[in-house]
Amino acid sequence: MDFFNPIILAVLIAGLYMAWNIGANDLANSMGTSVGSGALSIKQVVIIAGVLEVIGAVFFGDRVTTRIAKGIVPIEDIIAINPDIVIIGALAAILAAGFWITFATFFHMPVSTTHSIVGAVTGFGLVATLYLDNFGLDQIKWDILAKIVASWLTSPLIGAALAFIIFSLIRILLLARVDDPYKLETKFGYLQILSACFVAFAHGSNDVANAVGPLSAALAAAELTPFGVIPDWVLLLGGIGIVIGLATWGWRVIETVGKGITELTPTRGFSAEFATAVVVFGHSYSSLPISTTHTLVGAVVGVGLAGGLAAVDLSVIRKIIISWVITVPVAALTSGVIFAVIMRLL
Amino acid sequence: MPTKYIRSVLGIFGESPFKPVHTHAEKGGEAVRKLKEAVDAYCNKEYITVSTLDTEISGIEYEADIIKQTIRKLIPSSMMLPVDPNDLLSFLKPQDSIADNAHHTAHWLTLRETVLPLEIQQGLLELMERIVKTVDAYEDMVDDIAKLLETSFSKKEIKQILKKVPIVEELEHEVDITKKQLQQKVFKYEDELGGTGVFYMISLLRDMGNIADSASKAADRLRTMILRR
């Protein structure tokens, strides 16, 4: 099979669309906090985020990508039986996640691309058991899936705790002691450039997998890339797709959200961003795909709990929980249906 | 591409109710300073000016009401604030009464043209002066809320703002004393003023006293709000 096989091309295109959407919305959300506090202009944010996102994706994106590609559904077992199933499954998964994310974006639902892709990949694994005699439900790595789902719950909580601690330290050690707190904010504006870089980097290392995880599975199944290694060019492709999303559409999202969050001063922005970046990068290191934006929400609540924000609207949390509960089954079901349809057509 | 193709979680940032609280306090101050002009005009028998100022004060009071409603809308139960939302609302109420009472007083001034003995006139101007001072001190205290939020309630800033509460209360106390002295004088001149004139003046003094009283009450509630957080 070569690169110009229509199914491989379809996986590639769907993956790039996913990357575009991640850049246009998720990365833009994570970067919006820097613009809101006035630390950086939109143009500066786009450039900084673009560079750091690609670096994070290429150098540290392989762990989570490997996890999405073959950590939940053991594709090596399926390849041994029929590699075409994996390629079709990859297409079904990326299409399902892409459809759901598109739908959610139109209806402004705070859905996570990570949750969508994990649900979609799992859906493929479940439906594959119906098509293969030697592949059963017990072969799906439920323990890893449980670990991933648990990390979705704990990551915003850890983000909140960390942001609470960071902002409390800033408050007690600096804000309460300086004569002019506003001058301190100006200084933190510079630190916030660093924390924004860190967020983009961490985001790249975790979220590039949502776009190229299925692609790398399909490429390995087609024997276009060696099994078990994620080639740098695949990660680079994902990173570039995300940056294009940020540059072509994400800047508008940054502009929209930046206007709405003028309350976030640099000390608060720094605390939330730094906590988010640490948590997300920590999870990338542990090969756990998590939602950067949900972690950021947790971190903002943490700063709020430390008395750092004039108003935090907790109704968003309810919306996040609802879309969280909906996303996994919907993505899994859609993925399974698309898989069954393609199998019928071929 | 439609401009609404956005998936954002940053709705987590609520709009601060403290900025409109500040604007609301300024409206009160504005109304009271206008009232001083109206009292001056009344003493100079410029009744048309009094009427014009009454209309202006009525407009300011209405604006303050709108701001009050905006603030209430900004505090749904899902909103997490650094203070108890109920404390914030019970602080807002007396603050709103400042403009309300200024409006009552201005309206009362338009109802009757009373020729005042010189001593009463001087007393009235002094009372008004003291009320303006009280409300100015009140506004000065409210100005500090921004810094309080910026440092997220540092001990230093809490001390700073809590020092200003007794200042407002002290000034209100002086208003009270001036008012009582003036009440005595009103009865001293009861023959000159006539029964209606006395009734008119006593009511006027009560309304004026209420302005400073509201500022002092609001200052007290602000202290409660800060200490109870």
Image (cartoon, coloured by chain):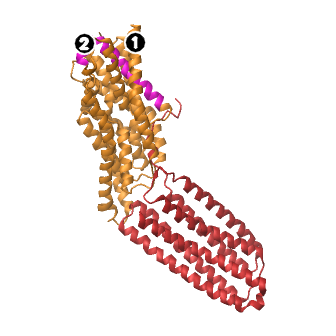
Chain colours: A orange, B red
Asked whether, in this view, residue A127 is left or right of residue A79, the answer is right
Is residue A3 covered in magenta?
Answer: no
Q: Are marks 1 and 2 on the same chain?
A: yes
Q: Which residue is mark 2?
A: A134
- Residue A138: where, in percent of width, then height? 25, 21
The answer to whether residue A339 is above or below residue A234 is above
Point 57% across, 55% down: residue: B70
Which label was assigned to residue A342?
1
- Residue B106: where, in percent of width, then height? 70, 72
The residue range painted magenta reads A75-104
Asked whether, in this view, residue A98 is left or right of residue A274, the answer is right
Point 73% across, 91% down: residue: B189
The answer to whether residue A88 is above or below residue B87 is above
The answer to which of A51 and A59 lies nearer the viewer is A59
Badge 1 crowding class, 10 Å Cα cut-off, few under 14, some 14 to 19, many 20 or more, is few
Q: CA distance from mark 1 to mark 2?
A: 21 Å
Identify the amino acid type marked 2: Asn
